[in-house]
Amino acid sequence: MFCVVSNISCPPLPSVHQNSRQIALLPELLINQIAAGEVVERPAAALKELLENSIDAGATEIEIELQEGGIKRLRVADNGRGIARDQLHLAIARHATSKIASLDDLEAVETLGFRGEALASIAAISRLSIVSIVPADDSNATHHAWRLDVLGGTYGEPEPASRAQGTVITAEDLYFNTPARRKFLKTPATEYGHCEDAAIRAALSAPHVAFTLTHNGKRIWAYAAGNTEARVHAVLGAEFAAAAVGVEVNNPALSLHGLVGAPTFTRTSRDQQFMFVNGRFVRDKVLSHAMTEAYRDVLHHHRQPVFVLFLGLAPQEVDVNVHPTKTEVRFRDSRAAHQFVFHAVKKSLATPVAMGDAPSADPQRYSTTFAEPTESLLIAKSWPESRANFATTRAPSAGPSAEFKDSMAWLKTQQGVLDVRQDVAPYVVEYAKNTSPQSFSDRFVDGLKNQPSPAENTPKVASMLGFAIAQLHGIYILAQNEQGLVLVDMHAAHERVVYERLKCAIELSQLAVQPLLTPQLVAVSIGESELAFANKEFFDKLGFDVAVISARELAVRAVPAMLPNIDVPVVIRQLLEDLGRHGASSALSDQRDEILSTMACHGAVRANRALTITEMNALLRDMEITERSGQCNHGRPTWFQFSIKDLDKLFMRGR
């Protein structure tokens, strides 16, 4: 039987009574396997639960051993309090825990784990073994260790075992009895990456605990027990330590401490953002928004800050029983938490202190302490500051593409745009017309006349941006043209010039390479070294000769000749980030311009570099023949024109 609606046939709706079944209790094993789908979605989730149990047990040393990304084998050994023989069966039972006993305990959870589902869920989908011993002074101690083996949720009696202290939990062949779940796992390399992320979060949350990670029999890293700063430095590296700003704020209700990266130390992804609430790593929209707002005035869009922060508050003020993975929380007063974090971080960024020389010498040096903002400040709206609209943005006309491309042969002989010698004579004559013979400007112009003449093959272009007069605060170029004054952001302008040249050079296969006298060594992670090895052709095309010399080190033997003064380690790591984000080669070709923009940004002239008049004029001339030179690669204007009329208004001339 079919129904017809608008001449379209469709099958009948199923009857409520069709295929009906009697309501029945699910088998215990099936219940645990269903729970495992939420709690243990992948090996990293199982590792997270085991690490939380070890930390809750008071461990000061934790060893993590993985095989095939944790799919084949996942082992966590600690020196914590241990589990007594008569408690081993309860340890793998559903909703059995020593961490809460009443509703009051649930509303004030002070441990990382509390649900009592983790071991039961892991045992239901793996070959699990627990070896544990309780301290000798414990009244329940039997003074030797016991072992319990569990196969897919079934187990026998504990047997004597050998263990000096703490607990060892081993889970092998994850999802061996649930093939439908196993087929959704990724490659061992991908699963290992997630496991390492889980291990790093645990290591950051408990700096007083020593951690060791081993994968496929090879030790990956080991962190000694210490304080928060030492652990953050060990995990995120010396570069972050040098650019980190300390945060230390306390009031009776809330506390925040940790390290935040300066606005100059950013990434393209959020992979190095760690927020802990009462020691628990969380992903919370309220706190994430607070961090975004704190960095809003100092960080360009599409860049992400790096931070490790620990928010503390009364357990009753935060609900951690929101999701089985326990990475989501709910604040009783989310607005107060948001404002507290926002003001604390914003205040710290306003008075940054360079770190890295002596982290433990003077704790006050690396902290920013201030009184809690008043309620009126917390609720006050932030209005953008108004400014006089006396400047009109105007982009130089884009020169013909053929002219720009024809200049590439000339550009190949240059080390950089700022080394080009330009003919300043036409500008000298124009500038000297209205200059007093006795003025300083005359002597200034006479000095310019003695500068070397340009090479015959130097492109001759129209002078729209005028003649450079001076450099302001090491950032801006002040120039004079027929309309009035021109103000140029030298870094933003040079960034656009370099970017367009890189694009043109790659399109014409004319990207010159500059060998380095001494290879630059770049420290990377194992995953990044594998990326570099698999994408050597990618680096070759961009003008970098990159070789993998060890699992954690690269050697850069050549760089693009157009970027002779770049910070090689910074650029290589940035390109590896792009590789990891975009993935395959086809995706990289689609994202080529974004990658070249990254290179151009690092290769452009930096602020506070003193430029000669010749160099400034060279940049102005390059802007005039470069397409889209009116905006930098990030969309900001590179120059402003101040007309004589605008200047007259400022000084009220003619009124």
Image (cartoon, rainbow, N blue to C red):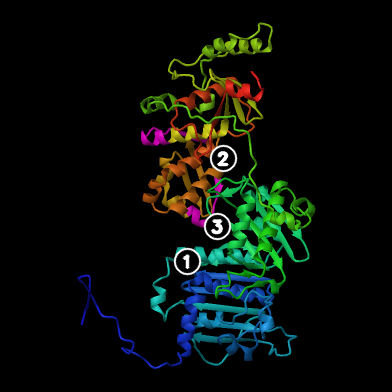
Image vertical order of residue 295 relative to residue 610, above or below: below
Residue in the foreground of this view, choosing between 479 and 457: 479
For marks 3 and 1 on the same chain, the one whose residue lies earlier in the sequence: 1
For marks 2 and 3 on the same chain, the one whose residue lies earlier in the sequence: 3
For label 3, the residue is 271
Q: Residue drawn at (70%, 90%), measured in percent from left and top?
A: 140
Magenta span of residues: 503-529
The C terminus lies in which quarter of the figure?
top right
| CA distance separating discs 3 and 1 | 16 Å
Q: In which quarter of the image is residue 158?
A: bottom right
Question: Along the horizontal axis of the image, is 326 left or right of 207?
Answer: left
* Label 1 element class: helix
| CA distance separating discs 2 and 3 | 22 Å
| CA distance separating discs 1 and 2 | 32 Å
For label 2, the residue is 567
Residue in the foreground of this view, choosing between 155 and 104: 104
Give residue 191's mark: 1
Let me know if residue 523 is in the magenta part. yes
